[in-house]
Amino acid sequence: MHLEPDETMSIQRTTDGIETAAERLMQARHLIVDLDGTLIREDEPLAGAVELLALFCDRYVIVSNNSTHTAGGVARRLARMGLKVAPERVVLAGEETVAFMNREHPRARILPIASAALQRHALSSGCTLVRTDAEFVLLGLDPHFNSARLGLVANQLHRGARLVATNGDDNHPGPGGSLVPETGALLAAVVAASGVRPWRVIGKPGPLLFEEGLRRLRAAPATTLVIGDNPATDALGAVRLGMSCLLVGGAPDADAPTLAALLRARAASVALERKHVEGLAQGLHRAVVV
Ligand SMILES: [Mg+2]
């Protein structure tokens, strides 16, 4: 799914090298970090992920356009990979879409096209889920999406339901350089079949997930750093809210090729700073003795 024209406007990023990126990491008081392609790739943690989360300890949240899992499910999945993360530190597009619907349209009739986990979460948080006469279609990454469901959605939209999508990503990176289709790919099919554009797209680069992350951290945008791998979602969303952003990965304007490389550069900066402070202290000591 292509983003709206104002969202396709690429942000002008300047990358001043990995040393400057390391300095910005050192200065950050709070961290908002992306999940897929930044901390993990499918079921594998990426190099540096464990160390980054340890460095920020109780000063980070993970903000992801994931719509198939709940925060509890993601925390369990991360634990299997050796990443210990409390569910409260995980902000997801699927759950935030349910929260948005409960906040803005409580008791609305919602047709869910989404994973079983997200549907259970929606039901348990008070949503009214229906198959007919829907006021809204909630579209997430439904692993069982097929032509029958496409027909169901298209007809509900045709008769006036509004389309709310969890996120607009076409895909996210999978193992061995592969692509994993995302909600945006399903959204493109829905728009093509129905002729109806989404009424709301909740995930990044929109503000709702980042704002929820800042709220949980009790953090200000000016002292919060976003680390992600996607210029169109992570960087654009961060910059719009006045947050600094570092991109890792293979994008041409990435600040560092990997989290591990970024952390190595940070360690070198810390060592250099310590040497400088020790040098100053020795100079002061000599001056006092003389
Ligand atoms: Mg990502």
Image (cartoon, rainbow, N blue to C red):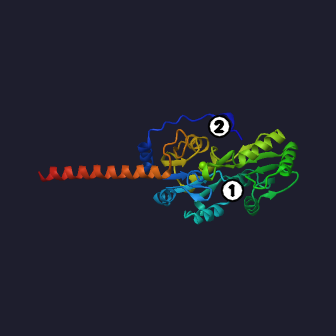
Task: Measuring from the top left, give residue 214's x and y in whole percent.
Answer: 56, 52
Q: Answer whether residue 120 is visible to the viewer in this image.
A: yes
Q: Are marks 2 and 1 in contact (CB under 8 Å)?
A: no
Q: CA distance from mark 2 to mark 1?
A: 23 Å
Helix, strand or loop at disc 2? Answer: helix
Residue flagged by tag 1: what amino acid is it? Glu
Q: Answer whether residue 108 is visible to the viewer in this image.
A: no
Disc tally is 2
Quarter of image, res 198: top right
The first of marks 2 and 1 along the sequence is 2
Task: Measuring from the top left, give residue 133's x and y in whole percent.
Answer: 88, 51
Which residue position is annotated with label 2?
7
Which residue position is annotated with label 1?
95
Farthest left residue in view: 290
Q: Is residue 65 above or below residue 11?
A: below
Residue drawn 59% across and 44% down? 230
Quadrant containing the N terminus in the rendered view? top right
Quarter of image, res 85: bottom right
